[in-house]
Amino acid sequence: MKYLNEIFKFGLACCLILGFSSCNPDDDQEAPCCDAANPACPNYDPCTSITEPTADFAMQEGVLTSNGIIFGRDDSVFYKDVRYSALHDSSIYTHTWSLGAEVISDPVFSRTHNIPANQRPVYITVSHVIEFPVDSTCFTNLTGRDSLARTYYLIKYVNELAVYGNFRGVFENETDSFDFSFGLYDTEGNDALVYESSSIFIEVNFHNLGETTHYGLIGVNSIGYMNGSASADPRGFILPQDSPDVYKIEYRLYLIDFVVNARKLN
């Protein structure tokens, strides 16, 4: 960005002037404003609110809920359905995606990977090129083109998704913790393969019940959903938090709302 040093120095100077002026009740002269985003200020910088365009993009997978599909956060581990979303999607940008032999020009698109379990796990790379008009006022070194490639992983076993596994949690506003788990297994008790038709949902000590249940947690890597009645069986979500391996489980059971804060053990 042009003249950053000069703008910073001027901004610092005028803010010091403003500070000294505010301490002198006898001085009626109004100090200059110091807001670089305000065109009326001497240090106005038209580039303050402009971000540099990049080819960065998000990849997400969603779960079907009673309120439609809800997508998890940006991720790189998926079951089968991936949505690719460019961060810059207005009409001034041109997009070129490469996914295998396919070329896509939309800013947002989705693909389903119907790859059988015996051909998994699979790593897939998608690349994104963005082209845009260069704002020469604010950016002097841009070429009007940026590119990014990302690789993601398609699981072989459902329990590879992060929402399944062993957890230690505590009910909100309580102090005593308890261990519990979510999983999907075949009829012999092994981790279920993707597309396993006879798989069984198993929860151990969910809600600190001290028993094994089969409510069913429908999950992708960054969001899980229980689609029960909210009375005899739970309805709600398990969601990752900002800290690694920390999750919040919010659900309704026996027509009462519960929140469990948990850490994943493995």
Image: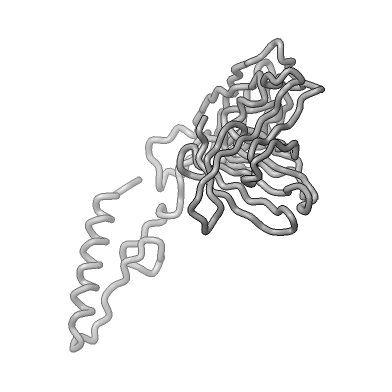
Residue at the image position 18 percent from the left and 89 percent from the top: 26
Q: Please state which of residues 219 and 122 is positioned toward the viewer in this rendering.
A: 219
Q: How is the image coloured?
A: one colour
Q: Residue 228: give x, y in percent of width and height.
A: 78, 46
Q: Please state which of residues 2 and 9 is positioned toward the viewer in this rendering.
A: 9
Q: Is residue 45 above or below residue 186?
A: below
Residue at the image position 62 percent from the left and 32 percent from the top: 164
- Figure quadrant of the N terminus: top left
Q: Quadrant of residue 222?
A: top right
Q: Inspect this view and state whether residue 68 appears.
A: no
Residue at the image position 41 percent from the left and 52 percent from the top: 47
Q: Residue 13: give x, y in percent of width and height.
A: 21, 64
Q: Quadrant of residue 199?
A: top right
Q: Residue 35: give x, y in percent of width and height.
A: 35, 65
Q: Please state which of residues 4 and 157 is positioned toward the viewer in this rendering.
A: 157
Q: Residue 205: give x, y in percent of width and height.
A: 63, 40
**Residue 129 falls left or right of residue 195:** left
Q: Inspect this view and state whether residue 170 appears.
A: yes
Residue, far front: 210
